[in-house]
Amino acid sequence: MLGAPARFLHPDPTPARTPMRTLHVIALGGTIASSTSPAPTDSADSTGRTGPTSSTDRTDSTGPTAPARGVAPTVTAEEITAAARLDTLPGGAPQVSAEQLAQVGSGSIDFGILFSTVLAARRAAARGVDGIVLTQGTDTLEDSAFALSLLNDSGIPIVLTGAMRNPTLPGADGPANVRAAALTALVPEAAGLRAALVFADEVHDPLFVRKAHTSHVSPFTSGPVVGALGWVAEDRVRLPHLPAPRTLPVGLAVPRGSGADAAPDTAHAPNLDFPRVAHIDVGFDDGLEFLATLPEAGYWGAVLAGVGGGHVAARAVEAVEALAVRMPVVLASRTGAGATLEDTYGYPGAEIDLLSRGLLPAGLLDARKARIALTLALACGVDPAEVLAAFR
């Protein structure tokens, strides 16, 4: 007679426990944090200093104040986290902490704030956090996501999200987006990602994602060819299109040893002077004569968003070459999708001609992301060609 199935012979009286997951939420402001409550008269800049707000919509005897109409960022990181009901995630409630790193509209987010975010991610990773959700405004969400995909060396993913409908409106989407971002940050498959953008239940690669509509509740796309990395449904994350890892220069990193890495109560990055990099869209019948003024205006580099595969008018070639002698100039395309051409067209002003005159090809990067890559390369003292090579 055969014995009973093995699963009934030796029951385990002490089943293994699943380790508690840990999540850190960092808030920077934006629509997801906006309400009709009066905005504070003081605001923190990217280095942690406080001072009067910069709005000049209305002034009184105490100085500039917030606009009299509309919503502004006032909702805290703790309140954003609570609204997402992360205590009801499948698999048990994670241990969640929250940090208010800035409280600004996304147009005011700068490289200093993103450096501070990386420092916060390093501190979180050091205390055993599994993943980070970063909330901010959507206007520059794609920019922050790409910059953090270059800079985040904490070893845990930073998943960015926000909202299109602020908390005062019916159907506010912030809580659902934070919940989807939290699920993504905690899923094991995302552990190898430096950054991802999650919005309207879609998971996007920072390399390709862009905001394509000013007000639609689902404004982000990674089209028209690539598409999203995956999606979230029924509180489950599916990631069938994870990207291959990219090798980036070692020097492309937030400086260590500034004190912020070692001191838990120091939230902000050192006050660095970030280089100014111009983004120039080439227009129809554009001679680009003004390029000669960029060095005197304080620019350290430029990204040229050429027409088509990366082209300019023949009469603009002399101005472009003269600028490339004085500063790094990256050649991108204004189309927003596809790689910059390198070896197809040979007429004056086409890509073969321009690259032979010292311009650097943007590869897969659109002009906006190429500008971020060039800025960070210059700020970190890394050869821009080494950074751009990762995207060719």
Image (cartoon, helix red, strand yellow):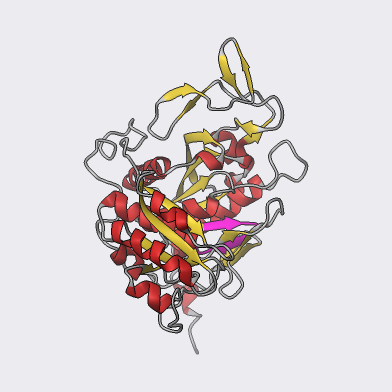
Q: Is residue 338 above or below residue 31?
A: below
Q: To which quarter of the image does residue 245 belong?
A: bottom left
Q: Could you tell me residue 248's position as x and y percent?
A: 31, 64
Q: Is residue 258 left or right of residue 47?
A: left
The structure residue drawn at horizontal position 54% and vertical position 49%, both measured from the top left corner, is 140
Q: Residue furthest front?
A: 315
Q: Could you tell me residue 335's position as x and y percent?
A: 57, 68
Q: Is residue 220 left or right of residue 374?
A: right
Is residue 263 or residue 250 the one in the foreground? 250
Q: Could you tell me residue 77's position as x and y percent?
A: 54, 36
Count of marks placed on residues:
0
The structure residue drawn at horizontal position 28% and vertical position 33%, both measured from the top left corner, is 263
Q: Could you tell me residue 265's position as x and y percent?
A: 33, 30
Instruction: Decide whether the magenta segment is chiefly helix, strand or loop.
Output: strand
Q: Is residue 114 left or right of residue 283?
A: left
Is residue 371 or residue 28 the one in the foreground? 371
Q: Quadrant of the C terminus?
A: bottom left
- In the rendered structure, does residue 201 fall within the stretch colored magenta? yes
Q: Is residue 144 above or below residue 225?
A: above
Please provide the residue range marked out in magenta.
Answer: 197-206
Would residue 153 be seen by someone viewing this image from the given angle? no
The structure residue drawn at horizontal position 40% and vertical position 61%, both measured from the top left corner, is 319
Q: Is residue 277 left or right of residue 197?
A: left
Q: To which quarter of the image does residue 39 belong?
A: top right
